[in-house]
Amino acid sequence: MKIGITYDLRDEYLKEGYSEEETAEFDSVETIESIENALKSLGHSVARVGNAKQLLQRLAKGERWDLVFNICEGLRGLGRESVVPGLLELYEIPYTFSDPATMALCLHKGWCKAVLRQAGLPTGDFVAVSGPQDLADADMAFPVFVKPVAEGTGKGISADSRVDNQEALGRECEKIWSSLGQPALVETYLPGREFTVGILGTGPLARVIGTLEVRLRPQAQAHAYSLHNKEHWKDCVEYLKVHPEKDDAGAQAESVALSAWRLLGCRDGGRMDLRCDAAGNPVFIEANPLAGLRPGYSDLPLVCEAAGLPYEDLIAGILDSAMARYCPKGAETRSCA
């Protein structure tokens, strides 16, 4: 099968003048090479396509692929992760991971939490605050947690994100409005254990690969799995494998994560993040339908490593899940290629 890879290469954006923080979610050469090598080891031919603009240029020239392995994060706007899936649907090219609607829903953390709450899944109180005129709506008991409504990788989060009074709330919201140009999400602060749950598959075939507890070391930024803590994870973070058969909270986290994954329509592979409330109950925080895939760094490969799942098998599982949508009914997934 001829597979194209779409991605946002961080080095390219840095050369164009974008900042380290603006490009924090983008991919390294190592990530692209790792996916490419895994796909080749499965017997496929691989073409590096690049970002959304590069994809559009190549589509306009008439290039086509049997499937696109898409990890494009996009650069701007609440629909940025939907751009490449939307283009590929327009050109009727099969692709990995979630469709445009799910990508947009999950990127907006407020909308995502509202949908899950409506479905009865546990998530903390929250309000999206677009400007000073909305601050009065954030009538929640302190402490609260303040973060951007649509960022990943801990962008816009620091030790100051946990706030204890109205003055600090206004200050943290202002930082997000001015630096990222998007609403701030104000949430009930969750003081308990934090979990990231890895999931492989789609719909009823989706399954939990494994779960890591994210525990901050003393030298880490306090209160949150921030961008700083992630980028310096070897010094700042301890990842502990969860054994759900003897860890009630871990088992609860996996159950909530899998229910949320299916309800949101997430596909192929990704992660769900949860944190325990004051009573020790896991509460949904964020969905990651386009999780990082850098071996030895990104959380999903780390979950797989802890679970004993080789990186090549992770990529094969994602590909099999995607191909099951496009293969004729009854065909063997891999032979379908």
Image (spheres, helix red, strand yellow):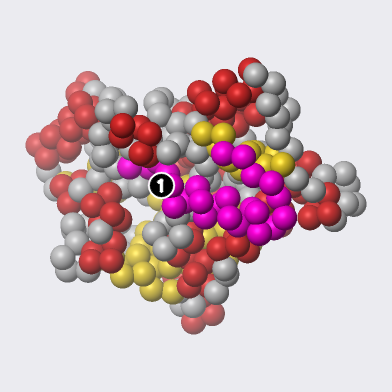
Residue 58, can we see it? yes
Q: Position of residue 129 (x, y in %)?
A: 29, 29
* Residue at screen point 53% across, 72% down: 307
Based on the picture, tell me whether residue 47 belongs to the magenta stretch.
yes
* Drawn side of residue 274 relative to residue 268, left or right: left
* Drawn side of residue 1 relative to residue 225, left or right: right
Residues 246 and 92: in front is 92
The residue wearing badge 1 is 28
Q: Is residue 311 above or below residue 149?
A: below
* Residue at screen point 33% across, 42% down: 24
Q: Which residues are magenta?
A: 24-48
Q: Position of residue 60 (x, y in %)?
A: 63, 17
Q: Is residue 152 above or below residue 269?
A: above
Q: Is residue 147 above or below residue 311?
A: above
Residues 126 and 317: in front is 317
Residue 121, can we see it? no
* Residue at screen point 29% across, 42% down: 155
